[in-house]
Structures are given as C-alpha cells and as structure tokens.
Image (cartoon, rainbow, N blue to C red):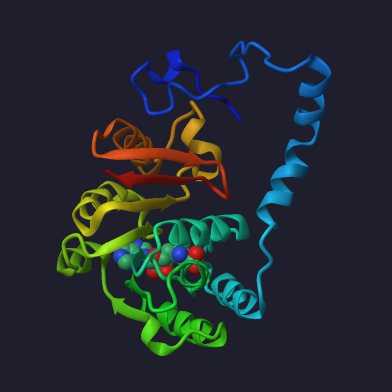
Amino acid sequence: MAHATSSSLGTTGPISRFPTPTDTVTPRHPRGQERVITANRQTSWAFADAYVAEDEALHWARDRARDAGLRSVSPGTGAALRLLAASVDAKAVAEIGTGCGVSGIHLLHGMRPDGVLTTVDQEPEHQQSARQAFRDAGFAGNRARFIPGSALDVLPRLADAGYDLVFCDGDRQEYQDYLAESLRLLRPGGLVAFEGVFANGRTVDSGPQPTEVLRLRELVRAVRESTELVSSLLPVGDGLLCAVKR
Ligand SMILES: C[S@@+](CC[C@H](N)C(=O)[O-])C[C@H]1O[C@@H](n2cnc3c(N)ncnc32)[C@H](O)[C@@H]1O
C-alpha cells in the first residue's frame, strides 16, 4: 500500500498531520522499550478490540448482518459507543444506519435506562432484524424508535438540540450532510461519532481514491477545523471520528 505524505496530499489535506512510515519521530522512551511496544502492537489492538465481550443477541445480529452483506461495527467500536453514550448520560440518541442492530445494542447498553434510541435506515428489513435483536438483548420495545427512510429525508424532521449523541453509519458520501444535521440536532455538550473514516486504510493512501474516500478526507478536515467542535479520531475498528459540540 502506498502511504500518504504531506507533499503528496498537500499541507492543508485532512491527513497532513498523520505520521507516516517516512516521518522522523524523536523517541521519548528508551529504544528497547519502544521495540517491545511496536512488536506487540497488533496483539494489543486485537486485545483492545475484544476487551468487552459480546452476548448471544449481538452474535445473532452480527450473523444477520453478514447474511445481508452488511458491515457491523467491530466489538471494540461497540464498546467505545457504549462508553460515549454513558459519558454524556445519553437519554436521546440518533443513529443513522440501523443495519441489523449491532451498534444499536451497544448504544442502548451505554444509555440511561429510560433512554430512547431513534434509529434511521432506508431498508425496513434491516430494521426488522434489529428490532428482534434489541428484544433478544432484553430491551423493552419503547427503548427504540425505528424510522424507515433515507437519512437526508428523515433527519430534518428530528428536533433541534433534542439529542445527546448522534451516531453516523449510513452512506459515507453523505457524512458532511450528517455533520450539518448533527450540529443542529445536538444539545451543547452532545457528541457526534462517524464510523469507518479509515476506509480500510484508503483515507491515508496516496493512490487514486473513489469519491467516498475524498469525501471522508473532507469530513475529517471539517470536523478538526470546526470551532464548534472538540474532536478526536479514535483508532478503533475502522476509525471512529468523534467530536463534542461546545
Ligand atoms: C454499515 S450498515 C450499518 C451497521 C450498523 N450501524 C451496525 O453496526 O450494526 C449501513 C446501513 O445504513 C443504511 N443506509 C445506507 N445509506 C442510507 C441512507 N442514505 N439513509 C438511510 N440509511 C442508509 C443501509 O441500509 C445499512 O443498513
């Protein structure tokens, strides 16, 4: 894989501050210790991704998603979503891209016991699987509001400042639109998260990339440069871009 450099992508590109294999990094640890950390990195990442165990309902939802040819969030990303929902004491969460319910179950676990997940998907049969998965996971029917439809049709109908967290996992080409809607939907102190911003490594690859990847780079830049947001790109799963609305 070709790796991006600041010269190949322009100094103003969204990934211009990412370290690359050619960067010179001044070691801050004794050399021996640095080697141990590097050698164990893959194992450490695998350990982190499996850190929170998944139950039968999650396994069932993952299997349905696989059958339908859908990506689901990784267990590590799911654990991060739980943490984020709990950290904002989420009572109202909006999700774009229900899928078969893997991310939804994780979000519900992190939310307040009386919290409601509003989840949008353009494929009603995916939402049927998610509904079953939420039930199997032990969540009462009134904990989730399923809205079928295209995100850009549904989001404008949701209430201003009515949400503690917005999780975006729909059409990656629409993420910039989801960002604009999220800024309207979130209360101050609320949090937005975008799944899959690494695009399997293509976001930092200097080779020719499809529009989806170019849009993801624009999103990463826009979130980082927004004065309304405090952001962090978590290297979990396929990259979870998170930001708190000031
Ligand atoms: C990657 S899957 C979501 C997986 C789910 N978040 C999980 O981890 O279990 C993406 C979902 O977004 C839905 N989707 C794609 N584009 C959409 C759009 N423009 N509006 C609404 N839903 C969309 C697809 O039907 C699919 O179910």
**Foreground pick, 63 / 56:** 56
Q: Quadrant of ligand 1?
A: bottom left
Residue 30 place in picture, x, y as percent:
78, 15
Residue name at image x 26 percent, y 73 percent: 149
Seen from the viewer's position, the closer of residues 206 and 130 is: 130
Quadrant of the image containing the C terminus: top left
Answer above or below: position of 106 versus 19: below
Percent from the top left, x then y, of residue 148?
29, 77
Q: Quadrant of residue 34?
A: top right
- x%, y% of residue 189? 30, 50
Residue at point 34%, 59% (across, down)? 166
Q: Which quadrant holds the N terminus? A: top right
Quadrant of res 123: bottom left
Residue 117 relative to residue 161: left or right: right
Residue 36 left/right relative to 131: right
Relative vertical location of residue 32 with respect to residue 78 in this rendering, above or below: above
Left or right: 55 with respect to 98? Answer: right
Going by the image, does 42 lie left or right of 233? right
Q: Nearer the viewer, residue 16 or 36?
A: 36
Report the number of discs: 0
Residue at horizontal 29 percent and vertical 77 percent from the top: 147
